[in-house]
Image: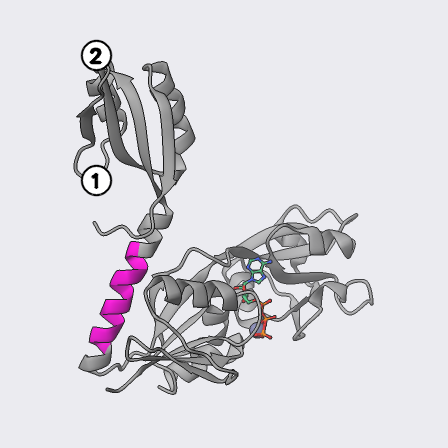
């Protein structure tokens, strides 16, 4: 059987989460010491380990069929590829930053300034949209030292907590792009490979859905069951089982991570006790 080839970052921030996701999708890799490729033992798939910056091009050219890469890299590379699914990890933003004593509260400040970045395409398109003209200095790494050595007035780089900026005497001024890891695909997959992609996509959605939801079990007095059922509608409707103790029920449902803490407060207010919240491994809607 022909393999679908999935490009994954060879080392760096994306690698571990990318491989973990594929594993959670049931793909088993018997990766010996061969760090260029790994063959799945239970699915017609092969992982290729590449530099993340090269992944869009390899996917465009069909060397790889799919790839896992940051949206920031996809946008910067402007290749002919399709983004098929956001993956929810490697969340970060691309931001303009300036020396910490500089007042750069408006984008106008950047007019006529020198900006060092590894993302010239994204920065240029942002500046153009804002009607600002600035000098872009493309550098491939350690962008944050550029202002300190007099190479630039500002930088545009990936930020997650801002601690790297801070330790280089910089502060975030404007966020110009939000990014997370995405699954990309070649625009010209064969029918056979499209079918494999759809299988993988179905599994990714089940994994992501599970990640965003928790299984919840609790005890409640019978008179609160209706109220609690409306707070916890679950996938179809909650399961309600009688407790051995007269007048009490056990309620089982699914609750999403985002509203979880608010709901716990409401449940307690309705007399819920013994609340258990457990992770869900896969969730198929
Ligand atoms: P390579 O040597 O493969 O080119 P790199 O330095 O470009 O590595 P990493 O630092 O591993 O790449 O980052 C890979 C991707 O992870 C980035 O393109 C971005 O999408 C995301 N990322 C980068 N920094 C962070 C961060 N601090 N927090 C979360 N995600 C990040
Ligand atoms: Zn890179």
Q: Is residue 157 above or below residue 107?
A: below
Q: Relative to residue 146, is residue 247 drawn left or right?
A: left
Q: Position of residue 239 (x, y in %)?
A: 19, 31
What is the quadrant of the N terminus in the image?
A: bottom left
| Quadrant in which residue 56 is drawn | bottom left
Q: Relative to residue 280, is residue 120 drawn left or right?
A: right
Q: Position of residue 173 (x, y in %)?
A: 65, 50
For ligand 1, tell me if the residue under mark 2 lies within 8 Å.
no
Q: Which mark is residue 147?
A: none
Q: Magenta span has 201?
A: yes
* Dominant secondary structure (helix, strand or loop) of the stretch shown in magenta: helix
Task: For label 1, count other residues whose C-alpha is less than 10 Å away and answer few (under 14), some (14-19) or many (20+).
Answer: few
Q: Position of residue 79 (x, y in %)?
A: 41, 78
Q: Residue at x 40, y 38 (%)?
A: 258
Task: For label 2, count other residues whose C-alpha is less than 10 Å away and answer few (under 14), some (14-19) or many (20+).
Answer: few
- Pick the front one: 16 or 162: 16
Q: Is residue 58 above or below residue 136?
A: below
Mark 1 and mark 2: Cα distance apart in space? 26 Å
Residue marked by disc 2: 247
Q: Which mark is residue 235?
A: 1
Q: Residue at x 40, y 63 (%)?
A: 21
Q: Is residue 4 visible?
A: yes
Query: Which image quarter has ligand 1?
Result: bottom right
Mark 2 secondary-structure assignment: loop
Instruction: Give the mark nearer the N terminus: 1 vs 2.
Output: 1
Q: Magenta span has 217?
A: no
Q: Residue at x 33, y 14 (%)?
A: 271
- Pick the front one: 218 or 91: 218
Q: Which residues are magenta?
A: 194-206
Q: Is residue 85 above or below residue 109?
A: below
Mark 1 secondary-structure assignment: loop
């Amino acid at each position: 059987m022909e393999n679908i080839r999935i490009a994954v970052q060879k080392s760096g921030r994306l690698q571990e989460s990318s491989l973990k996701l594929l594993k959670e999708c049931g793909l088993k890799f018997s990766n010996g010491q061969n760090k260029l490729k790994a063959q799945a033992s239970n699915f017609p798939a092969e992982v290729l380990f590449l530099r993340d910056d090269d992944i869009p091009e390899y996917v465009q050219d069909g060397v790889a069929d799919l790839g896992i890469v940051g949206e920031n890299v996809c946008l910067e590379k402007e290749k002919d590829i399709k983004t098929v699914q956001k993956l929810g990890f490697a969340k970060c933003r691309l931001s303009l930053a300036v020396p910490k004593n500089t007042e750069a509260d408006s984008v106008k400040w950047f007019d006529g300034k020198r900006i060092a970045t590894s993302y010239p395409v994204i920065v240029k398109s942002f500046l153009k949209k804002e009607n600002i003209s600035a000098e872009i200095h493309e550098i491939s790494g350690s962008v944050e030292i550029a202002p300190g050595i007099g190479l630039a007035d500002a930088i545009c780089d990936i930020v997650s907590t801002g601690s790297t900026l801070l330790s280089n005497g910089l502060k975030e001024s404007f966020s110009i792009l939000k990014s997370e890891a995405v699954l990309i695909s070649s625009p010209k997959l064969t029918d056979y490979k499209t079918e494999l992609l759809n299988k993988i996509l179905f599994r990714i959605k089940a994994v992501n859905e599970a990640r965003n939801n928790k299984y919840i079990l609790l005890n409640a007095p019978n008179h609160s069951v209706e109220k609690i059922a409306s707070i916890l509608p679950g996938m179809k409707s909650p399961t309600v089982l009688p407790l051995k103790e007269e007048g009490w029920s056990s309620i089982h449902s699914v609750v999403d991570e985002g509203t979880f803490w608010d709901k716990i407060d409401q449940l307690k207010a309705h007399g819920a006790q013994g609340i258990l919240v457990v992770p869900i491994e896969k969730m198929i809607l």
